Image (cartoon, helix red, strand yellow):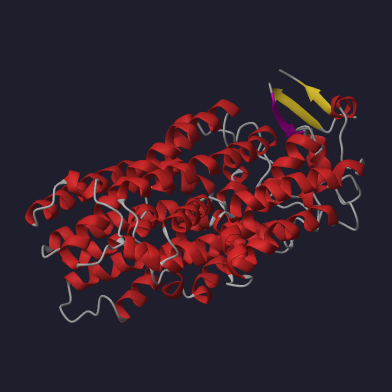
């Protein structure tokens, strides 16, 4: 009996009979249902602009700038950013495949490896980390709102109480846009990304002008040497470089899990692959370069390399420019926040009880968590942001990405019974009472030692392991999961079985 349809080469949908059967399932709701053929409308441009919008944000300027603030020279800092992002692009592309192929979101995709109940672990991990990022972005965007208000009030406390008011305003805007759903996000990305490009160009002009005014050329900025004393104070060049790579990987470690939430709207595998390849790395390097220049010019003008470009607002004397730049910051931060940090936690929270918690309630809960996180602590200084926040995120999420990749490509051979993922009466992906203990063992074993290093436990060994935590955890989890799953047969769909449940119509 056919339960799914291959409507184009390598693209599948649940058929109408299956959708009717699953209407009352506790594992199904309108937000977790696979995308239909008509909903897969995203082109290469849509995917590319999604990435441009996510990359070009205020925190995006910080990845190279924060390394410079820790003592690293601009050139090795930029190489560090390139390596980290090139590495994380691999699991991004691999985990995108299932979303495009079957139209399923991340919480459902996680069921094939962690089990129908166990999938709540990676979904909640992704959701909690994303909510933390959402909080950081709201804090950054709130600074821009506060700056706009200061234009109309000379007594406004921009850095104090005013920034908390700005944070609240940005959070409200995020909530409103989040409730509009995926089409609202696509619309925001398509119109916001060109504006972001203009903002980047404007920042470059400001950096060059400030540098010239202080006798520093662009060449001086790029070819400045390492600050050896500052590097030694932060663990030495090698430690900062390796930990920086892990931190730059960790920037997208969250999206490397829930990328199916977006790739499921793509028209084809070529569309999602090319859109990410063409836009992700170039956008990251352009932004990191601007951030590096910003760090060096502020080091000259203020004595300290700044990693948070909202600091530029405090140096603008023209009120008109403050408003224009602030609006650009707000747009840039919103595009990233909506795509990378709102959809994932909303879907993850909804997955806890699909029949009771909708995507809209997931959005509301995410915004509440933004307050609980208190982002003024997370984004306190370069070391806390890069090593404590980003490093810990990569340590915990890297093994999850490895398990998803290993299960889908190596264990399951890309063959999924989509109906079984939602069917209460089908135990294909139930494992042991809904939990795949093998996946949980592989995950815990892969992150436990690096996490000790992140927490300062275990001395030099765990410290150096944590500096490479994403790569180390990924490899351990991948290998261990494949070994543990060798004896598991129930969740494996043979080619013959796959053909029996799949109707080919193209």
* Magenta region, residue range: 10-14
- Is residue 20 visible in the rendered image? The answer is yes
Percent of width and height locating residue 266:
57, 34
Task: Relative to 455, say whether 399 is above or below.
Answer: above
Determine which quarter of the picture holds residue 381.
bottom left
What residue is rendered at 25% in x and 75% in y? 158
The reply to whether residue 436 is in sight is no
What residue is rendered at 25% in x and 66% in y?
A: 304
Dividing the picture into quadrants, the one containing residue 67 is: bottom left
Give the side of residue 73 with respect to residue 433, left or right: left
Residue at 35% from the left image edge and 55% from the top image edge: 72
Residue drawn 15% across the image and 58% down it: 321
Is 140 magenta? The answer is no
In this rendering, position of residue 442 left or right of residue 64: right
321 left or right, relative to 349 = left
Q: Nearer the viewer, residue 293 or 19?
A: 293
- Split into 4 quadrants, where in the image is the C terminus? top right
User: Is residue 13 magenta-colored?
Assistant: yes
Give percent across and percent down for residue 455. Answer: 59, 71
- Residue 235 picture location, percent across and down: 45, 64
Residue nearest the viewer, comparing 242 with 376: 242
Residue 38 placement (x, y as % from top left): 61, 32
Number of disc labels: 0
| Towards the viewer: 122 or 172 | 122
Q: In the shown orientation, is residue 335 left or right of residue 458?
A: left
Instruction: Name the quadrant of the N terminus.
Output: top right
Give the prevailing secondary structure in the magenta stretch. strand
């Amino acid at each position: 009996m056919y339960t799914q349809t291959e409507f184009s080469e390598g693209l599948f949908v649940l058929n109408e009979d299956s959708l009717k059967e699953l209407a009352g399932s506790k594992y199904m709701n309108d937000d977790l249902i696979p995308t239909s053929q008509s909903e897969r409308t995203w082109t290469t441009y849509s995917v590319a602009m999604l990435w441009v919008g996510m990359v070009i944000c205020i925190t995006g300027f910080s990845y190279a700038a924060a390394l410079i603030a820790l003592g690293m020279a601009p050139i090795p800092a930029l190489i560090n950013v390139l390596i980290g992002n090139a590495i994380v692009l691999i699991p991004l592309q691999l985990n995108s495949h299932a979303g495009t192929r079957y139209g399923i979101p991340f919480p459902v995709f996680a069921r094939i490896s962690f089990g129908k109940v166990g999938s709540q672990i990676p979904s909640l991990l992704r959701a909690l980390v994303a909510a933390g990022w959402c909080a950081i972005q709201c804090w950054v965007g709130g600074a821009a709102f506060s700056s706009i208000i200061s234009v109309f009030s000379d007594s406004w406390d921009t850095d104090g109480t005013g920034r908390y008011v700005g944070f609240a305003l940005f959070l409200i805007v995020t909530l409103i846009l989040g409730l509009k759903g995926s089409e609202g996000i696509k619309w925001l990305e398509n119109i916001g990304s060109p504006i972001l490009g203009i903002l980047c160009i404007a920042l470059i002009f400001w950096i060059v002008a400030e540098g010239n005014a202080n006798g520093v050329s662009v060449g001086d900025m790029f070819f400045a040497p390492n600050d050896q004393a500052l590097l030694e104070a932060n663990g030495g060049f090698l430690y900062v470089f390796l930990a920086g790579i892990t931190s730059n990987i960790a920037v997208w470690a969250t999206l490397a899990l829930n990328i199916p939430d977006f790739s499921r709207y793509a028209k084809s595998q070529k569309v999602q692959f090319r859109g990410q390849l063409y836009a992700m790395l170039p956008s990251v390097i352009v932004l990191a370069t601007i951030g590096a220049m910003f760090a060096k010019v502020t080091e000259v003008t203020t004595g300290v390399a700044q990693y948070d470009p909202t600091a530029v607002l405090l140096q603008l004397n023209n009120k008109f420019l403050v408003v224009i730049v602030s609006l650009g910051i707000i747009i840039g931060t919103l595009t990233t926040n909506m795509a990378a940090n709102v959809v994932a936690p909303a879907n993850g929270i909804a997955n806890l009880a699909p029949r009771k918690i909708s995507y809209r309630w997931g959005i509301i809960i995410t915004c509440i968590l933004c307050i609980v996180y208190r982002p003024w602590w997370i984004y306190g200084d370069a070391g806390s942001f890069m090593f404590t926040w980003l490093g810990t995120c990569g340590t915990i999420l890297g093994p999850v990405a490895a398990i998803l990749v290993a299960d889908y490509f190596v264990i399951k051979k890309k063959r999924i019974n989509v109906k079984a993922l939602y069917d209460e009466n089908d135990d294909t992906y139930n494992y042991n009472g809904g939990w795949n203990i093998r996946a949980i063992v592989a995950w815990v074993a892969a992150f436990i030692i690096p996490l000790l290093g992140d927490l300062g436990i275990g001395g030099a060994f765990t410290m150096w392991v944590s500096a490479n935590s994403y790569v180390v955890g990924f490899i351990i989890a991948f290998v261990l999961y494949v070994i543990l799953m060798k004896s598991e047969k129930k969740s494996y769909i043979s080619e013959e079985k796959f053909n029996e449940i799949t109707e080919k119509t193209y």
